[in-house]
Image (spheres, grey):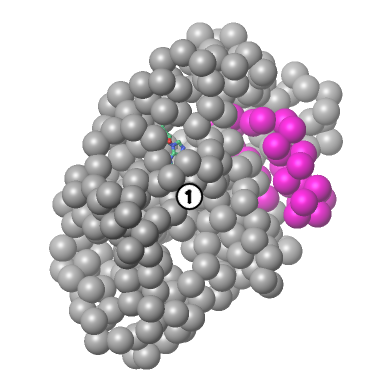
Amino acid sequence: MSCTVVVCGFFGDTGKGKIISYLSLKDRTAVTARAGVGPNAGHTVVHKGKEFKLRMLPSAFVYDKCKLLIGPGVLVNLKILLNEIELTKSKDRVGVDRQCAIIEPRHIEADKKGELAKKIKSTGSGSGPCNAERALRTARLARDLPELEGLLRDVPLEVNNAIDEGENVLIEGTQGTYLSLYHGTYPFCTSKDITASAACSDVGVGPTKVDDVILVLKAYTTRVGAGPLQGELSWEEAEKRGWAEVATVTGRRRRAAPFNYELAKRAVMLNGATKAALTKIDVLFPDCKGIKSYEELSRKAKQFIKNVEREVKVPVELIGTGPGAWETVDRRA
Ligand code: IMP
Ligand code: MG
């Protein structure tokens, strides 16, 4: 039984949603607490042949006994939240912390106009302006909204109680290490820190309570929006390699580059990662599609995994071989 934080080691969109959905089903996770910025995130979950694109609810909704909590550090868009509760039929197990700040229409408007949209190419979800208002102490909180009344919880208390009772707990980070306001490619970054320490703070869990930090890395690197991307390929080249992706929230093309060992290594340090998950290995090695045991992976795929482990110095314990939750190689003891 353990408390595990899941964060991304690149620029987001590495498959945290898929990894969390797998872990929740496999480990029968009692509680998953969503950390991170807010609805600027898009986590894709494929379960029983159906695709879900979540921006507010934890990706662990696929395990129907998992309690789904949103920590006080997270910004809430009420409409998106209520839509997702409806879509996933999860009302009886969702809880929103009383202190989550609320994204208002004026935040979205400010995010879509002005510098954030033009220079940073933000997601336009209102997250930056809402976090700015939160720092100014003018944002409204979840406790101020009658529509949320039945969903309000003390999320830090519930998460810590679950940990103390020896339950399996997941903390779901968002975005990626190099989009962090502190550790990322400023000013081309999101509106707060989003490394593992920040994810813990978002849900009110202290560092001594965490057993594992899983760093999710994709077999190649992608980035949406502006900012540096070393080794960036043309869209045509990305298409040729099968790396041409479209963003979940904005529908924009994701810029693509080869796997970046230096960034991965530094992300292990910044997040205190104890293990790594390597996703989309089937995109690099199509013969690995859907494989569930390490032994059955091709020689080239195993070599790539070994190279990653040698460089980043933590074991790659989860390997994604397809978008479905169960298309995963699990090397944990
Ligand atoms: P914001 O978070 O909407 O302010 O956007 C700031 C930058 O972070 C932009 O380049 C966005 O494309 C990027 N970004 C924000 N959230 C995500 C995410 O969940 N995945 C990938 N990129 C993101
Ligand atoms: Mg995403």
- Position of residue 150 measured from the top left corner of the image (x, y, whole percent): 83, 36
Residues in magenta?
Answer: 68-95
**Residue 315 horizontal side relative to residue 121, left or right:** left
Q: Is residue 294 above or below residue 119?
A: below
Image side of residue 300 versus residue 117, left or right: left
> Hey, what amino acid is under mark 1?
Val
Q: Is residue 151 magenta?
A: no
Residue ID for mark 1: 246
In the rendered image, residue 193, in percent from the top left (x then y), is placed at 38, 32
Residue at position x 81%, y 54% in the image: 89
Residue farthest toward the bottom in the current orientation of the protein = 296
Q: Is residue 69 magenta?
A: yes
Q: Nearer the viewer, residue 291 or 331?
A: 291
Of residues 191 and 157, the one drawn nearer to the viewer in this rendering? 191
Residue that appears at 56% across and 24% down: 126
Left or right: 9 with respect to 111?
A: left
